[in-house]
Amino acid sequence: MNSIARHLITLGAVALAIAACSEERKSLADYISAICAAPFRSASAEEAPFLTESVSAMTKMMIDMGVRPTGDVDNDFVAMMVPHHQGAIDMAIAELRFGRNERLRRMAQEIIVTQQQEIAAMRLAVSEPLPSSVPSPTQLSAQGVSDTR
C-alpha cells in the first residue's frame, strides 16, 4: 500500500472518529480514544478489560507525544519519545495483567525493562534529571501485575 493510500485510510479513521464524537464538544483525548478504540468494538467481554487498558495507554501516549516545539530538536525528540516508550510500558503491563502466553509475558517484562532503560538514557543525553526510583511495574503486587499464572 502506498503512502497516499495509508494517509487516506488514516484520514478516514479520523473522520469517522470525529463524526462519532460530534454529538457534543469533545476533547482531543476523546477523539484519539475513539480512533484507537474503533477496531475493538466487536471484542468479547473477556477481552474488554485488556482492550480498555490498552486503548487508555495508546490515548495517553498519543496525547503526550503532542509536544510544543522548543527549537531544540534533541529536547523535542526526547519529549516525544518518552511518552512513546511509556506507552509501550503501559501496554506491556496490560499484557502481564491479562495475557496467558508465558513467552509473551516474558517479552512484556523485557519490554518494560528496556523501555525504562531507554527513557533514562534519553533523559540523561539531554541533561534531564531522572525521576525518583519507584518499584518496577512488575513488582507492584497490589495492582495484580506480579501474580503467578
Image: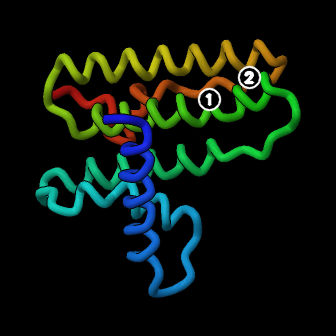
Of residues 41 and 127, the one nearer the viewer is 41
Name the amino acid, label 2: Leu
Q: Residue at x 45, y 86 (%)?
A: 23
Of residues 145 and 84, the one nearer the viewer is 84
| Residue 130 placement (x, y as % from top left) | 74, 22
Q: Is residue 119 left or right of residue 125?
A: left
Q: Is residue 77 left or right of residue 142?
A: right
Mark 2 or 1, closer to the camera: 1
User: CB of mark 2 within 8 Å of CB of mark 1?
Assistant: no
Q: Is residue 125 left or right of residue 63?
A: right
Quarter residue 76 falls in: top right
Labelled disc at residue 81: 1
Mark 1 residue element: helix
Residue position for label 2: 130
Name the amino acid, label 1: Met
145 is higher (above) or lower (below) than 33: above
Of residues 43 and 2, the one nearer the viewer is 2
Q: Residue at x 42, y 26 (%)?
A: 139
